[in-house]
Image (cartoon, rainbow, N blue to C red):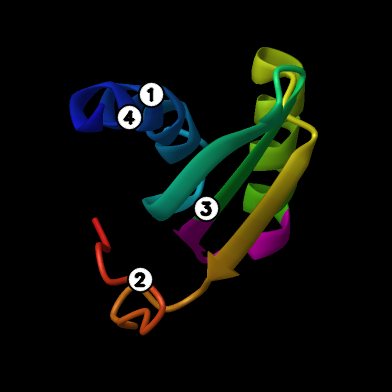
Amino acid sequence: FTGAYARVRSQFKTPIGKLEGVEEVHDLHIWAITPRQVNLSVHLISKNGEKALREAEELLHINYQIHHTTIQVEFNPDHSCSQCPFQK
């Protein structure tokens, strides 16, 4: 189960990390409420938070049909996220 979950996470983490201005993606979680309702939460480090947020939401909506997201944008790459025990 752990290996399968890691592969699924990487399928989302990689494209989000390639968005312009996104320096890092961490604390990504994905789960299904129902077979048709998937939720995703993630933390991004970006100096252009509004743009990164908008593009990440668009990517998830259009490419993966994930409409229930919680995306936290952090602006300081040196910041150690106290809520992220498995950062990176």
* Residue stretch in magenta: 43-50
Q: Mark 4 packing: few (<14 Cα in 10 Å), some, or many (20+)?
A: few
Circle 2 SS class: loop
Label 1 to label 2: alpha-carbon separation: 19 Å
Q: Which residue is mark 3?
A: 42
- Number of marks present in the image shown: 4
Q: Residue at x 56, y 37 (%)?
A: 31
| Cβ atoms under marks 2 and 4 closer than 8 Å | no
Label 4 to label 3: alpha-carbon separation: 15 Å
Q: Which residue is mark 1?
A: 8
Earlier in the chain: of badge 2 and badge 4, it is 4
Q: Amino acid at mark 4?
A: Tyr
Q: Residue 72: within the magenta?
A: no
85 and 46: which one is in front? Answer: 85
- Work out whether 61 lies above or below 68: above
Q: Which residue is mark 2?
A: 84
| Cβ atoms under marks 1 and 4 closer than 8 Å | yes
Q: Which residue is mark 4?
A: 5
Circle 1 SS class: helix
Q: Position of residue 9 (x, y in %)?
A: 38, 32
| Cβ atoms under marks 3 and 2 closer than 8 Å | no
- The answer, for residue 48, to whether it is visible in the render is no
- Work out whether 49 lies above or below 37: below
